[in-house]
Amino acid sequence: MAEAPWARGLRAVAWMLVAVLVGALGVGMGFQVREALDRERDFRAAPECASVPVEVSDCLWEQDFTVRGTDLNSGRDGESPEADLELPGGEPWHVTFRNTGPVLSGLAPDEKVVGLVWKGDVVEVRDAEGRRQQTSDGPVGWPEDRLAGAIGCVSFGVVAFAGGLWGLFGRRSRRHVVAAAAVRWHALAIGAAAIVMLWVQAGAGWPMWSIPVGWGVAALVLLGSAVGFALAGLRGVIR
Protein backbone atom coordinates (compact mmCIF):
# COMPACT_ATOMS: atom_id res chain seq x y z
CA MET A 1 0.00 0.00 0.00
CA ALA A 2 1.44 3.34 -1.12
CA GLU A 3 2.14 5.92 1.53
CA ALA A 4 -0.15 8.96 1.45
CA PRO A 5 1.43 12.29 0.37
CA TRP A 6 0.40 13.90 3.66
CA ALA A 7 2.33 11.25 5.60
CA ARG A 8 5.41 11.87 3.45
CA GLY A 9 5.05 15.59 4.02
CA LEU A 10 4.72 15.10 7.77
CA ARG A 11 7.91 13.05 7.86
CA ALA A 12 9.73 15.68 5.82
CA VAL A 13 8.59 18.44 8.19
CA ALA A 14 9.79 16.38 11.17
CA TRP A 15 13.23 16.09 9.56
CA MET A 16 13.28 19.84 8.97
CA LEU A 17 12.43 20.59 12.59
CA VAL A 18 15.17 18.26 13.84
CA ALA A 19 17.59 19.83 11.37
CA VAL A 20 16.82 23.33 12.66
CA LEU A 21 17.23 22.29 16.30
CA VAL A 22 20.51 20.45 15.71
CA GLY A 23 21.81 23.24 13.48
CA ALA A 24 21.02 25.81 16.18
CA LEU A 25 22.90 23.68 18.71
CA GLY A 26 25.87 23.65 16.34
CA VAL A 27 25.80 27.44 16.00
CA GLY A 28 25.85 27.71 19.80
CA MET A 29 28.88 25.41 19.95
CA GLY A 30 30.58 27.50 17.30
CA PHE A 31 30.30 30.60 19.50
CA GLN A 32 31.94 28.63 22.34
CA VAL A 33 35.09 27.76 20.38
CA ARG A 34 36.80 31.13 20.93
CA GLU A 35 35.98 31.09 24.64
CA ALA A 36 37.32 27.54 24.96
CA LEU A 37 40.52 28.51 23.13
CA ASP A 38 41.06 31.49 25.43
CA ARG A 39 40.48 29.37 28.52
CA GLU A 40 42.91 26.67 27.40
CA ARG A 41 45.50 29.32 26.52
CA ASP A 42 45.14 30.91 29.97
CA PHE A 43 45.55 27.50 31.60
CA ARG A 44 48.72 26.66 29.69
CA ALA A 45 50.19 30.06 30.54
CA ALA A 46 49.25 29.95 34.21
CA PRO A 47 52.18 30.06 36.68
CA GLU A 48 52.60 27.78 39.67
CA CYS A 49 51.27 29.07 42.97
CA ALA A 50 53.92 30.17 45.44
CA SER A 51 51.79 28.87 48.32
CA VAL A 52 48.45 27.21 48.96
CA PRO A 53 45.79 29.51 47.45
CA VAL A 54 43.23 30.52 50.06
CA GLU A 55 40.75 31.70 47.42
CA VAL A 56 40.04 31.18 43.72
CA SER A 57 43.32 31.84 41.90
CA ASP A 58 44.66 31.84 38.33
CA CYS A 59 47.81 30.02 39.40
CA LEU A 60 48.31 26.23 39.41
CA TRP A 61 48.52 24.27 42.64
CA GLU A 62 49.13 20.53 43.08
CA GLN A 63 47.06 19.19 45.95
CA ASP A 64 47.30 15.73 47.53
CA PHE A 65 44.04 13.80 47.83
CA THR A 66 42.89 10.42 49.09
CA VAL A 67 40.34 8.53 47.01
CA ARG A 68 37.23 7.67 49.01
CA GLY A 69 35.20 6.16 46.19
CA THR A 70 34.49 6.19 42.46
CA ASP A 71 31.42 5.67 40.31
CA LEU A 72 32.09 5.01 36.64
CA ASN A 73 28.39 5.39 35.71
CA SER A 74 29.16 3.58 32.50
CA GLY A 75 26.46 4.70 30.08
CA ARG A 76 23.77 5.02 32.77
CA ASP A 77 21.25 7.82 32.41
CA GLY A 78 23.82 10.09 30.78
CA GLU A 79 25.62 10.61 34.10
CA SER A 80 29.29 11.58 34.19
CA PRO A 81 31.89 9.29 35.77
CA GLU A 82 32.85 10.66 39.18
CA ALA A 83 35.16 10.33 42.16
CA ASP A 84 34.95 11.38 45.78
CA LEU A 85 38.28 12.71 47.00
CA GLU A 86 39.38 13.83 50.45
CA LEU A 87 41.84 16.53 51.44
CA PRO A 88 44.48 15.78 54.10
CA GLY A 89 42.33 17.71 56.59
CA GLY A 90 39.32 15.47 55.92
CA GLU A 91 37.32 17.87 53.73
CA PRO A 92 35.52 16.08 50.85
CA TRP A 93 35.94 17.12 47.20
CA HIS A 94 33.64 15.75 44.49
CA VAL A 95 35.05 15.54 40.97
CA THR A 96 33.43 14.49 37.68
CA PHE A 97 35.13 13.34 34.48
CA ARG A 98 34.30 13.25 30.77
CA ASN A 99 35.23 9.56 30.54
CA THR A 100 36.64 6.73 32.67
CA GLY A 101 40.21 6.50 31.40
CA PRO A 102 43.08 6.43 31.76
CA VAL A 103 43.13 7.27 35.49
CA LEU A 104 39.62 7.06 36.95
CA SER A 105 38.96 3.44 35.97
CA GLY A 106 42.05 2.30 37.90
CA LEU A 107 41.46 4.20 41.14
CA ALA A 108 40.69 2.33 44.34
CA PRO A 109 39.55 3.53 47.78
CA ASP A 110 42.35 4.90 49.98
CA GLU A 111 44.62 5.39 46.98
CA LYS A 112 46.64 8.61 46.92
CA VAL A 113 46.33 10.95 43.92
CA VAL A 114 47.44 14.47 43.08
CA GLY A 115 44.89 16.99 41.85
CA LEU A 116 45.82 20.05 39.83
CA VAL A 117 43.77 22.99 41.12
CA TRP A 118 43.10 26.00 38.88
CA LYS A 119 40.56 28.76 39.47
CA GLY A 120 39.08 26.85 42.38
CA ASP A 121 38.51 23.61 40.44
CA VAL A 122 40.38 20.32 40.20
CA VAL A 123 41.11 20.29 36.47
CA GLU A 124 43.40 17.26 36.35
CA VAL A 125 44.12 14.17 38.42
CA ARG A 126 47.43 12.28 38.46
CA ASP A 127 47.76 8.78 39.91
CA ALA A 128 50.74 7.14 41.59
CA GLU A 129 52.03 5.86 38.24
CA GLY A 130 52.13 9.34 36.78
CA ARG A 131 49.14 8.96 34.48
CA ARG A 132 47.07 12.11 34.05
CA GLN A 133 43.40 12.67 33.24
CA GLN A 134 41.43 15.86 32.75
CA THR A 135 38.29 16.32 34.80
CA SER A 136 35.06 17.81 33.49
CA ASP A 137 36.42 21.23 34.54
CA GLY A 138 39.68 20.74 32.64
CA PRO A 139 40.14 23.22 29.78
CA VAL A 140 42.34 21.05 27.57
CA GLY A 141 40.52 19.54 24.58
CA TRP A 142 37.37 21.65 24.82
CA PRO A 143 38.17 23.81 21.75
CA GLU A 144 38.45 20.71 19.57
CA ASP A 145 35.30 19.27 21.11
CA ARG A 146 33.30 22.45 20.47
CA LEU A 147 34.68 22.81 16.92
CA ALA A 148 33.83 19.25 15.93
CA GLY A 149 30.38 19.57 17.50
CA ALA A 150 29.73 22.80 15.63
CA ILE A 151 30.83 21.36 12.29
CA GLY A 152 28.89 18.15 12.77
CA CYS A 153 25.65 19.74 13.95
CA VAL A 154 25.60 22.61 11.42
CA SER A 155 26.48 20.37 8.46
CA PHE A 156 23.81 17.87 9.45
CA GLY A 157 21.30 20.67 9.90
CA VAL A 158 21.95 22.22 6.48
CA VAL A 159 21.90 18.97 4.49
CA ALA A 160 19.00 17.43 6.43
CA PHE A 161 16.93 20.60 6.05
CA ALA A 162 17.57 20.60 2.31
CA GLY A 163 16.52 16.95 2.12
CA GLY A 164 13.43 17.62 4.20
CA LEU A 165 12.44 20.60 2.05
CA TRP A 166 12.88 18.51 -1.09
CA GLY A 167 10.79 15.73 0.42
CA LEU A 168 8.07 18.20 1.38
CA PHE A 169 7.68 19.77 -2.08
CA GLY A 170 8.20 16.48 -3.89
CA ARG A 171 5.92 14.40 -1.64
CA ARG A 172 3.55 13.50 -4.50
CA SER A 173 6.32 11.81 -6.48
CA ARG A 174 7.69 8.51 -5.20
CA ARG A 175 10.98 9.10 -6.99
CA HIS A 176 11.47 12.53 -5.44
CA VAL A 177 10.64 11.10 -2.00
CA VAL A 178 13.30 8.40 -2.39
CA ALA A 179 15.89 10.90 -3.65
CA ALA A 180 15.17 13.29 -0.76
CA ALA A 181 15.44 10.44 1.74
CA ALA A 182 18.88 9.57 0.36
CA VAL A 183 20.01 13.15 0.98
CA ARG A 184 18.64 13.14 4.53
CA TRP A 185 20.34 9.90 5.51
CA HIS A 186 23.61 11.13 4.08
CA ALA A 187 23.22 14.18 6.34
CA LEU A 188 23.62 11.87 9.32
CA ALA A 189 26.86 10.47 7.90
CA ILE A 190 28.21 13.94 7.11
CA GLY A 191 27.52 15.13 10.65
CA ALA A 192 28.96 11.97 12.20
CA ALA A 193 32.15 12.39 10.15
CA ALA A 194 33.07 15.41 12.27
CA ILE A 195 32.81 13.36 15.47
CA VAL A 196 34.87 10.56 13.97
CA MET A 197 37.49 13.10 12.94
CA LEU A 198 37.56 14.43 16.52
CA TRP A 199 38.35 10.92 17.80
CA VAL A 200 41.07 10.49 15.19
CA GLN A 201 42.59 13.90 16.00
CA ALA A 202 42.58 13.22 19.74
CA GLY A 203 44.06 9.74 19.33
CA ALA A 204 46.79 10.84 16.93
CA GLY A 205 47.57 14.10 18.72
CA TRP A 206 47.11 16.12 15.53
CA PRO A 207 46.58 19.92 15.62
CA MET A 208 43.09 21.37 15.83
CA TRP A 209 42.98 22.38 12.16
CA SER A 210 43.10 18.71 11.15
CA ILE A 211 39.46 18.34 12.25
CA PRO A 212 37.90 20.63 9.59
CA VAL A 213 40.41 19.45 6.96
CA GLY A 214 39.72 15.76 7.56
CA TRP A 215 35.99 16.36 7.82
CA GLY A 216 36.04 18.37 4.58
CA VAL A 217 37.56 15.46 2.66
CA ALA A 218 35.03 13.01 4.12
CA ALA A 219 32.16 15.44 3.49
CA LEU A 220 33.08 15.79 -0.19
CA VAL A 221 33.04 12.01 -0.60
CA LEU A 222 29.72 11.71 1.21
CA LEU A 223 28.17 14.56 -0.78
CA GLY A 224 29.22 12.79 -3.97
CA SER A 225 27.57 9.64 -2.65
CA ALA A 226 24.42 11.60 -1.79
CA VAL A 227 24.24 13.00 -5.31
CA GLY A 228 24.69 9.52 -6.76
CA PHE A 229 21.95 8.01 -4.62
CA ALA A 230 19.62 10.94 -5.30
CA LEU A 231 20.08 10.58 -9.05
CA ALA A 232 19.49 6.82 -8.75
CA GLY A 233 16.26 7.59 -6.88
CA LEU A 234 15.09 10.04 -9.53
CA ARG A 235 15.73 7.46 -12.23
CA GLY A 236 13.82 4.81 -10.32
CA VAL A 237 16.89 2.61 -9.84
CA ILE A 238 16.32 2.52 -6.08
CA ARG A 239 12.89 2.52 -4.52
Image (cartoon, rainbow, N blue to C red):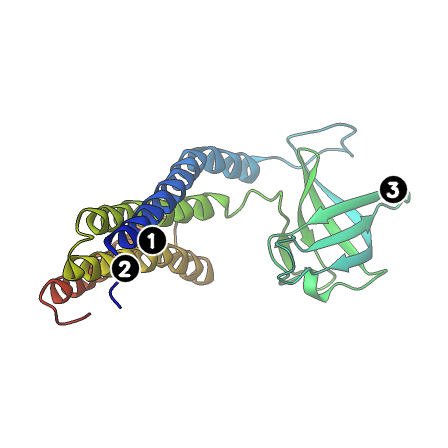
Q: In the displayed structure, would residue 238 be above or below residue 10? A: below
Nearer to the camera, 39 or 187: 187
Classify mark 3: residues with Cα within 10 Å, few (<14), some (14-19) or many (20+).
few
What is the secondary structure assignment of the residue under circle 3? loop
Residue 217 appears in the picture as rendered: no
Horizontal relation, residue 140 to residue 49: left or right: left
What is the secondary structure assignment of the residue under circle 1? helix
Q: Which residue is drawn at 45% across and 35% down?
A: 32
Which mark is first along the chain, 2 or 1?
2
Name the quadrant containing residue 131.
bottom right
Q: Label 3: which residue?
A: 91
Which mark is first along the chain, 2 or 3?
3
Locate the N terminus by quadrant: bottom left
Q: Residue at x 62, y 61 (%)?
A: 75
Name the quadrant containing residue 2.
bottom left
Name the spot of residue 205 as percent of width and height, x first: 44, 58
Q: Label 2: which residue?
A: 186
Residue type at mark 2: give it.
His
Classify mark 1: residues with Cα within 10 Å, few (<14), some (14-19) or many (20+).
some
Q: Real-space Cα distance between discs 3 and 2?
A: 52 Å
Q: Residue furthest bottom?
A: 237
Q: In the displayed structure, would residue 192 be above or below residue 169? A: below
Mark seen at residue 210: 1
